[in-house]
Image (cartoon, helix red, strand yellow):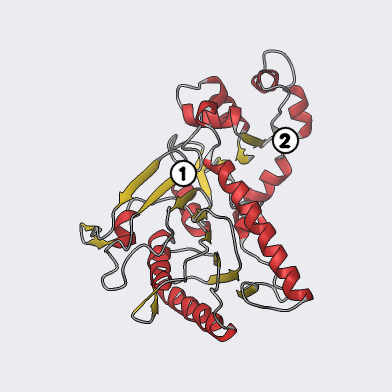
Amino acid sequence: MFTVYTEKEIFEEMIIFRDENPNWSTMLLNHCDVCINISDADFALELAAGKPIFEFIMANGGRSPIALKDYFDDIYKDKTKIIEKPRSAFILDINKQEADDLQKSLGVLVLSSKSIDDNILKGTYYKELQKDLVVEGGGKIGWNYLLNFNSQPSNAVVISDEYLFRNEERSQIVGQNNLLKLLNSIMPPTLDIPYHILIITQDHSRSKEWCEKMVGDLKSAIVASRPYQICLEMVFSDSIHKRKAMLNYFSLTCDKGFAMFKLSDNKTIRDDNDVRYEKIFNRLDFAEGDTEFMSSAINLKQIKSKCISVKDYINNVGADYNKRILGDCKKDKTIINRLIDDV
């Protein structure tokens, strides 16, 4: 489940005054593990009839918040520890400016207890894209136009698209340029930590030398586009069927993959396609089905399993077609992407 780290008072306000932050209240009640800044001894005193925490436990089949005062003490001493929880949210006793600065520097969702955005994890965007449609407006084209609204914190992305590098135009790989444009539109402009990128796709029987050159070229281009460190890992293998990009707090899916635009102008749709941007709690009611957080967790676990399988194959048999791991992984081919490491 999604984990929220919050002050006791904020947790109580959200479950008592639900109309003030209805989305957060629903998340805490139905979709989250809640860790609160309280000692075990003080928590025990809250387990009495009429106390908000006790009533929360009774109303949720015994599901209880977790007392984690020592962890909160560590966070307030060293807020970079937040990086260890890349798919969680922190509501802290700090001012809004400090919370915003932490989001920008660490790429993790941090809110001030004095200024809570109730819609920050809810929202979606969908666009049907017909072949030969020209995507542009307001001085932006292609991916930058489609995703011009993105403002979610992020420090990592996992992209699964089996056919990303299949097609060529004028001896150039269509997906390679599209991938660079896509990453440029979703990666934050600044960050104080390395940004983790994992791509899982097929090599389509291309040689080891081709794969290594392509990964090297991608890394060089991404590094040149941002002022912070980049960790790029590439797994050549079959993957999940869905063409999907998963970030810390939202996802992107495309029916026919991310090689969306023609290389000639980076703004003309190559084939009938679509794009769906969805924040992790756009769907909150049980009647709406799984949350996007849950859906992405399932996909990330599937990809993690595939990465482990390819790693074991390489270590036992050796790298081969569609059995390669390249880039900034560990020496034994273990993936270090923090989203994969979090599931």
Q: Are marks 2 and 1 in contact (CB under 8 Å)?
A: no
Q: Does residue 84 appear in the picture of this structure?
A: no
Foreground residue among 106 and 78? 106
Kind of residue at badge 2: Ala
Q: Describe the element under mark 1 as helix, strand or loop.
A: strand
Q: Residue 172: percent from the left, percent from the top?
A: 38, 79
Specify the farthest residue to the left.
Answer: 138
Can you identify the residue that label 2 sits on?
67
Q: Residue 45: percent from the left, percent from the top?
A: 75, 23
| Mark positioned earlier in the residue sequence (2 or 1) | 2
Q: Residue at x 57, y 23 (%)?
A: 15
For label 1, the crowd category at 10 Å Cα-Cα, with few meaning under 14, some 14 to 19 and many 20 or more, is many
Is 274 drawn above or below residue 1 in the view shown? below
Question: Could you tell whether 106 is left or right of 271 in the image?
Answer: right
Q: Which mark is residue 109?
A: none
Foreground residue among 94 and 61? 61
Q: CA distance from mark 2 to mark 1?
A: 28 Å
Q: Which mark is residue 279?
A: 1
